[in-house]
Image (cartoon, rainbow, N blue to C red):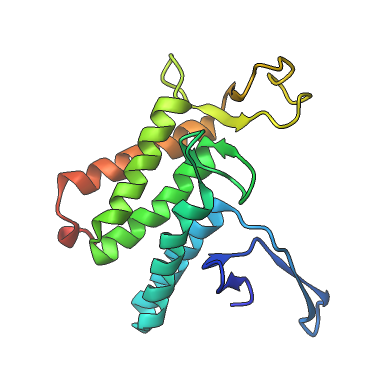
Amino acid sequence: TVLYDSAKHLYRWSVAFQDIPHRSGAVVANRYFSYDQGIAIEAELAAYRLELDAGRLARARDVAAAIPGAFWSDTLNGYDLELGIDQVYSSYSAWTALGELALYDVDADSRWLDEARRDANGLGTHTRQADGSYALRTYVCVDRTAPGCADPSARVVVDPTIDTAADAWAQHLETAIAIRLAQPAATLP
C-alpha cells in the first residue's frame, strides 16, 4: 500500500528501494497515471473476491471516484495519461475506463458505467478519425516546438498516427460497454 496516496485517493506510479535486498529506503514517485488507477481498481476487486474484505471494495470505489476529478480533460474529452498534463492517449484513456466497468460489474452503480461511456463517447468524438481508427493522442499546445503547435493559433492537436493499441483498447472499451448495456449488471460474472 506504499503506492496508495490516501489524500488523493490515487495510486502513485512506482516505488524503488535504495537497498533492494532489504526493501528499505523507499523512493516513491509522486506521479500519477490514469491507467494505473484502472489497474488498481481491478486488483482491489480481485483481492476483494478472494478475501471478502470490504476495505478492498471501498478502496476500489475511492479510486474510481477520484479518477474523473484527477484525470478528465474537458478540453480533450478523455482521461489525461498523467495527472496535470493535458494529453489524452486513446489507449490509456480507454484502459482507465475498463477499471470503472469492472467496478460496475461488482456493485451495479450506474455512475461507473456512465463514466466509462463518457470516456468512450469523448474518444469517439475527439480522437476517432475519418477512417474509423483512433488517433494515438491529442494534446493541448503548451510547447510551440511540439508537433502541430508551431502556429500560435494552434491550441489543441490531434496526433493522427494510426496506432493499433489505440484502436484495440478503444474498441475493447466500446465492446465492454455494449455487453453491459445489453444485459443487467446482476447477470454479469
Q: Position of residue 29 (x, y in %)?
A: 72, 64
Is 53 rendered above or below residue 63? below
126 with respect to 29 (left or right): left
Is 94 rendered above or below residue 135? below
Image quadrant for the C terminus?
bottom left
Q: Position of residue 28 (x, y in %)?
A: 73, 69
Q: Quadrant of residue 181?
A: top left
Image quadrant for the N terminus?
bottom right
Q: Quadrant of residue 153?
A: top right
Question: From this viewpoint, which residue is outermost toward the front?
Answer: 153
Is 22 rendered above or below residue 161? below
Q: Quadrant of residue 14?
A: bottom right
135 with respect to 30 (left or right): left
**Residue depicted at x 71% and y 17%:** 152
- Taking depth in this image into account, of 184 and 139 the one nearest to the observer is 139
Is 16 rendered above or below residue 162? below
Label total for image: 0
Q: Position of residue 52 (x, y in %)?
A: 34, 82
**Residue depicted at x 15% and y 49%:** 183
**Residue depicted at x 55% and y 43%:** 80
Q: Position of residue 82 (x, y in %)?
A: 62, 49
**Residue depicted at x 41% and y 61%:** 65
